[in-house]
Image (tube, grey):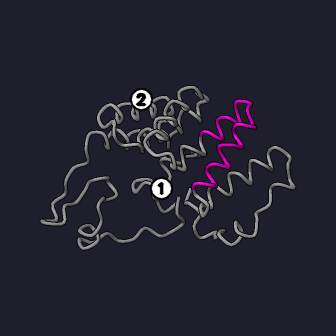
Amino acid sequence: MPAILPLAFANLPFAQTPERNNQPEPEATLSDAASSPELDSGEAVTKEDNEVEPPSPAEEAFQRAFEHAKNNELEEAIADCTEAIRLDPGTTKYLSGRAELYYETRKFDKGFEDADKILEANPSDLSARLLRGKMLEVSGDPDKALIEFNTAVERNPTSVQALLERHSYFQRQGQYDKATLTPTESFNFNPSHLPIY
């Protein structure tokens, strides 16, 4: 059974495979490569001369983390995310990936540390806010989890992901009367905006 990829990895270019997005794999052309910042291999292309530029060492480490996560080798994935963070501490997607992996391995203290660092840099970061909510709920603090889910919706009112996480939270808590969307939320809800997992 294939591993469930942490959200931080789900929408990355190298994570998109025909099986994951239910689309036939398109034929790659040179014009596609010139207009795309990344190839499937993760290599960046410069638009000036169409030469392939190799990914940064941090991006290579993050790609290795993705491969490990895909194979359900979560400790190795955490180590590679840590390496990516060491090489490029200013890129929050590496922190986000590691925080998701900490959640999957139930290392909540470390997951909270990474999520807090992301929220320090960007208080409206949706993935870090929702991850904090999920970790709080699983670790036994549903009241604080609800605060995180509500904050995610308030800061990202058109985010289907935030609305669905809060909706799911109410269902898991057995609060079915609250597990409905308000008219405004229903208007903002558009299934075509759902992320590909």
Residue ID at (62%, 57%): 161
Callout 1, which amino acid?
Answer: Asn
Q: Is residue 138 magenta?
A: yes
Image: 12 above or below 36: above
For label 2, the residue is 79
First of labels 2, 1 by sequence position: 1
Whether label 2 touches label 1, CB < 8 Å: no
Image: 192 above or below 124: below
Q: Residues within 10 Å of mark 2 (few under 14, many from 20)?
A: some
Q: Quadrant of residue 83?
A: top left
Please state the horizontal and vertical placement of residue 55, each as a whole percent of the image. 26, 48
In this orientation, which residue lies closer to the viewer: 88 or 44?
Answer: 88
Residue ID at (49%, 41%): 119
Image: 5 above or below 23: above
Q: Secondary structure at mark 1?
A: loop
Residue ID at (75%, 37%): 142
In the image, taking residue 111 as reference, residue 28 lies left or right, namely left
For label 1, the residue is 11
In this orientation, which residue lies closer to the viewer: 31 or 114?
Answer: 114
Please state the horizontal and vertical placement of residue 144, each as a whole percent of the image. 70, 37
Please report the bounds of the magenta region as a residue range. Answer: 132-155
Type of secondary structure dominating the magenta stretch? helix
Q: Quadrant of the N terminus?
A: top right
